[in-house]
Amino acid sequence: MISSYNRRDWLKTGLYGLGAVSLLTNSSPFDLKRRHKDVVRLSHNENPYGPSANAREAIIQSISKGNRYPRQAITDLKEVIASKEGVQAKNILITAGSTEILGLMGLIYGIQKGNIISGFPTFDYLMSYSKNFDSEWIRIPLDKEMYPLKKIEERIDSNTKLVFICNPNNPTGTYIPKSDMKVSILSMAQKTPVFVDEAYIEFTEGGINNSFAHIAARNPNVVVGRTFSKIYGMAGLRIGYAIAHEDSIKVMQKYFMGRMVTPSVTSLEAAKVSVGDDLFAEKSKSLTLEAKQMVYTAFEQWAVKHWRSHTNFIWFKTNKFLPGIYGSLEKKNVFIRTYSHTPGYARVSIGTKEEIQIFLDELGGLIA
């Protein structure tokens, strides 16, 4: 009878009997091996090492709470994040991934019609979603692959409802230091709301010290978006958050279709322990840097134009390789990202060193 078991015994004979013990608890998230016959997924900027061991244990421990709505878990996570970010819980909105924040902002400002301005290319979900409500997306070409802050500000007019800034930028991986960004953002915020997507901020040299969280908490016209999908390896668990002025959070809550209970309890508990897991985050960052250096070295040897990345991916030109680079790699079970709107360029996510070596081995065979 189930009643004769405690929760952990039941899990061991159920989930654990299928091999989940080693997957969730005993194995290190860094002990990963890949072989050439395996799929090497370097297309979605995922962290190959996460969730951390602590996050996996938190998931197991919280399964029994799955019959309850996650309101308390959301409150607890807000407090933990607020403490780490140096803001207050009232400045935080928890969502099911940062995509939900981007959609929410796209809704709020898209229904106002007018225009939303961003650099281009960039992560386009907010603007693409806003276009569903007949909002105009004004794209300002990147300035030497850097975000064109000055040109964006010059383009702001009476119809501008929002400015979107992705820093570090996806897909280029480039980063504008906080000191250089601050004057521009505060100036733009006097004219229109500004959303700063900081999905990859932890990969920058200064980490979250480079965040605009403190500014957003005080300025009602600045909102910061963050995620647990990247450095914490929780892309499939779907936890993100916005940091903003209390009044801005109230506006976002007004339009939130999920009544602010969309994240799962298990994901929330995993996120809560991940916030303080600096060892895992630093290890992930360190291994990512080592694997990035492998790509830099190969690209320099092959004279491939590429950009130094402040993220877990690298943007590069494909002209040194045979046509159809994506399809050729796909046949070898190696997946990278190309974009129809930027022909001649590709983005490779940084996986494990084993995965990157496979990528380089296969890519080397495509040199024209």
Image (cartoon, rainbow, N blue to C red):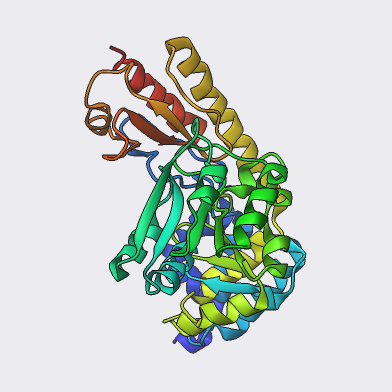
Q: Quadrant of the N terminus?
A: bottom left
Q: Where is residue 22 in the image (x, y as percent from the top left)?
A: 51, 54
Compared to residue 294, the image places residue 226 above or below, namely: below
Residue at the image position 57 percent from the left and 67 percent from the top? 241
Residue at the image position 58 percent from the left and 53 percent from the top? 198
Residue at the image position 47 percent from the left and 24 percent from the top? 306
Is residue 227 visible from the viewing direction of this image?
Answer: no
Q: In this view, does 203 lie to the left or right of 122?
A: right
Compared to residue 366, the image places residue 358 above or below, namely: below
Q: Where is residue 205 in the image (x, y as percent from the top left)?
A: 69, 39
| Foreground pick, 15 / 149 | 149
Residue at the image position 42 percent from the left and 17 percent from the top? 304
Q: In this view, does 107 lie to the left or right of 73?
A: left
| Foreground pick, 340 / 354 | 340
Task: Give the mark count.
Answer: 0
Q: Is residue 44 left or right of residue 144?
A: left
Q: Where is residue 66 in the image (x, y as percent from the top left)?
A: 49, 81
The quarter of the displayed image where residue 80 is located: bottom right
Name the residue furthest front: 158
Is residue 84 visible from the viewing direction of this image?
Answer: yes
Q: In which quarter of the image is the C terminus?
A: top left
Q: Position of residue 200 (x, y in %)?
A: 56, 48
